[in-house]
Image (cartoon, rainbow, N blue to C red):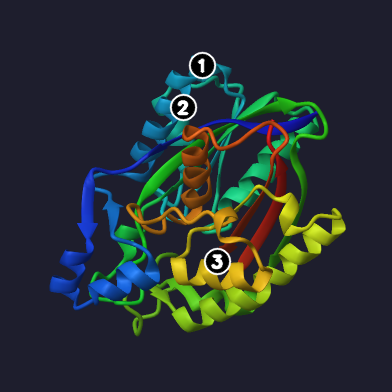
Amino acid sequence: MGFYIKAIEYYLPKKIIDNDYLEKECGIDKSFTENKVGIIERRIAEPDESTSQMATESLKQLLTNNNLDPKEIELLILCTQNPDYRLPTTACIVHNNLEMNKNSLAFDINLGCSGYVYSLVVAGSMIETGIVNNAVIIMVDQYSKIIDYKDKNTASIFGDAAAATLIEKCPNGYGVIDSNFGTDGSGAFQLIAWNSGVVKNPDKAPYLFMDGKEIFKFTVTAIPPTIDQLMKKNSLSTDDIKYFIFHQANMYMLNEIRKRLKIPTEKMIIDMKYIGNTVSATIPIALKNLMNNNQLLKGDLILFSGFGVGLSWGNIIYKWF
């Protein structure tokens, strides 16, 4: 048996930061943000809103809309880089919030923009090997808590969100068909939250730092070849793929990747205008919106690609079930 994405639900905080605010308060050019970055507004968690609260809300929606009891879930993986605490894991807090089965597994994965692809394969592997029969993976982050809103490199890009995905068994030949992954740790300091762990650097502000030029260079040079390799390995071309759902980093970056891979515009999903770059939640949110619009049919091939902080990346060819 393989594994497939049965359902997705996501949660967005109510607070909105729009481009008018960023232009007025931070001096970030509104037209550049809208036309180049591709974002008009982003959702931001309240100061007292925790990562576990956001994750719990997304999971509640998932369970309610699929008539599931929390005790039926056998595996919970929560992917975040801004947990409630260093310990315990945020997954354990969510597990308790919903009074899940004490025989179930719950743990965190510390990954950012590539987190959905990694988490999907980790959870799916545990289903394939018979350890569990089902799983939920929650992508949740609050970059707003580590951003300096006067930093033009980061303030206009990121939004907060949580997305919960239900994964179950399916016949072989559907779900995840193939995948590839990679890491370039030499770029670890190109996207970093200084002073957020045990290493302290008094010369660095305790905010998210991003070297935008280097991240862009990494993405547009390293990611297209790995996607080419995966498609060639499976004897596929862009004609065979229904949709390409990349991590929604920013519109300019996605269009550059699209051009290099010669992907038709209508096959490239860009879905960040009103929520921003929600880190690991971007792919499942974009996928859920396709599902809501009935744009996927059984047998359709989709290519997921996550890339970013680490530096890390992962690609999946997925057959819709």
Amino acid at the residue labelled 1: Leu
Foreground pick, 147 / 167 = 167
- For residue 185, above or below residue 20: below
Q: Please provide percent x and percent y for residue 231.
A: 79, 58
Looking at the image, do the residues carrying marks 1 and 2 touch, with CB atoms under 8 Å apart?
yes
At 52% from the left edge and 82% from the top edge, which residue is drawn?
214
Earlier residue among tags 3 and 2 = 2
At 55% from the left edge and 66% from the top edge, which residue is drawn?
308
Q: Please provide percent x and percent y for residue 235.
A: 86, 55
Q: Please provide percent x and percent y for residue 203.
A: 35, 85
Residue 68: mark in rendering: 1
At 40% from the left edge and 65% from the top edge, which residue is drawn?
196
Amino acid at the residue labelled 3: Gly
What is the spatial separation of the Cα atoms under label 1 and label 3, in whole angstroms?
33 Å
* SS assignment at label 1: loop
Density class for disc 2 (Cα within 10 Å; few <14, some 14-19, many ≥20) is: many
Foreground pick, 300 / 266 = 266
